[in-house]
Amino acid sequence: MVQKYHAFMFPWFAFGHMIPYLHLANKLAEKGHRVTFLLPKKAQKQLEHHNLFPDNIVFHPLTIPPVDDLPAGAETASDIPISLGKFLSAAMDLTRDQVEAAVRALRPDLILFDFAYWVPEMSKEYKVKSILYSVIAATTMAHNYVPSSELGVPPPGYPSSKVAYRVHDGHALSSLSIFYKRLYHRMTTGLMSCDIISMRTCEEVEGKFCDYIARQYQRKVLLTGPMLPEPEPLEDRWSSWLTGFRQGSVVFCARGSQFTLEMDQFQELCLGMELTEALPEGFEERVKGRGVVWGELVQQPLILAHPSVGCFVSHCGFGSMWESLMSDCQICQREETGWFSKESLSAVIISVMDEDSELGNLVRRNHSKLKEVLVSPGLLTGYTDKFVEALQDLVNDTNLE
């Protein structure tokens, strides 16, 4: 009989990190393993419905300590603009005593983490194996977070000349530079100190980048696949509304749980959508029957999979990229300035949705090739099964104690 293990999970306090961690927790729990999931108290209610095995997955809420300049009541990245992220990071570090107390009391076999770079040091004291589980793209990790990285410059031996920053990424690099040093320290310290690295990706999509990371850190790199939610019915409010439109005619726009647009960019986004005739003039008062404006979480993978949806205007977070690749929706890109105008947004949406567009046909062909690989029978379940088994081997590996 295979021995069951107990894993702690301690992701960064952002829903784009906590949700894929919880999807992975479900995979472990499905095999009979136990998971203790550490998270801010306020986040528990929003994540409970993702817990498919409450007998095996226990939420362990943490009290977020007050930090100067962190708004009162802020517990997740969704509660603050990106510019205040360093204060939430500081608050996360101040939960170390709570995390250590839980480890000391519950004695897990493993702890999976990402931004809490101090976890390996703490876990070694209690003979607990540490795994840095990254839900960020392996391409990003390989380019930005290896020991010789410099922001915007491919590090020595980087395995691609095509997957790299371009001139039009200047705005993104400028934004990233605000917190790059802090994040670089966190990631590289954790990667150098952990027992094993694991990544939310596939060999078929990012294999050479994972191999590069393994060489840079002299660590085994385990892959989990994209860790998407289990199938469930789409809520009737969305299913009924979407069914009223012809196939591939709806534009779905979602900006992520922590991506905030300035007012002028939000207005350009709305006007760009209006120019495509996706939304008529007047928006919320006059979109009835043709558009919906919604300010809460939705079942994004299921909406993207609906046959009426043809285009996805996205902030291009890694989770959203995976969900889009598994659907037939085409993702819109930004223009060279890094920002967008209403005219350029409208033009891009039309180009990817127009059946006679050369660009649209190229995008659809490339997307179809990737999707065909990802939906091949047994691919994703194979990654999960191998990962669960690899954790068992790690627990049994006395050489790492």
Image (cartoon, helix red, strand yellow):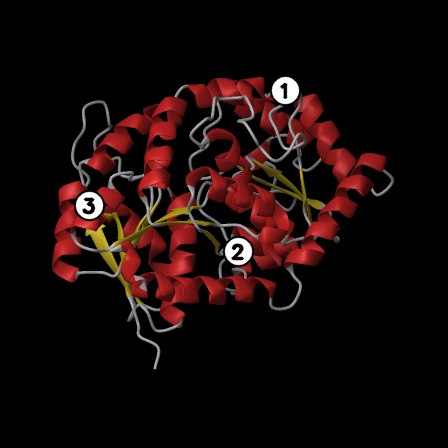
Q: Tell me: 184 left or right of 307.
A: left
Residue that badge 1 annotates: 168
Q: Which residue appears farthest toward the front when viewing the image?
A: 399
Q: Which element type, helix, strand or loop, lies under badge 3?
A: helix
Point out the tag, 1 or 3, that comes first from the N-terminus: 3
Query: Relative to residue 386, is residue 350 depicted above or below?
Result: above
Tell me the residue at 55%/35% (across/down).
315
Tell me the residue at 35%/54% (across/down).
47
Tell me the residue at 53%/27% (across/down).
155
Residue that badge 2 annotates: 225
From the viewer's side, name the closer residue of 98 and 238: 98
Viewer-nearest of discs 2 and 3: 3
Q: Tell me the amino acid under the disc marked 1.
A: His
Q: Which residue appears farthest toward the bottom when viewing the image?
A: 1
| Tag shown at residue 146 | none
**Quadrant position of the N terminus in the picture:** bottom left
Q: Tell me the amino acid under the disc marked 3.
A: Met
Point out the tag, 2 or 3, that comes first from the N-terminus: 3
Residue that badge 3 annotates: 122
Q: Tell me: 242 left or right of 14.
A: right
From the viewer's side, name the closer residue of 111 and 24: 111
Q: Are marks 1 and 3 in contact (CB under 8 Å)?
A: no
Q: Which element type, helix, strand or loop, lies under badge 1?
A: helix
Q: Which element type, helix, strand or loop, lies under badge 2?
A: loop
From the viewer's side, name the closer residue of 274 and 216: 216
Q: Give how far across and how far down residue 247 sits, in percent.
A: 74, 53
Viewer-nearest of discs 2 and 1: 2
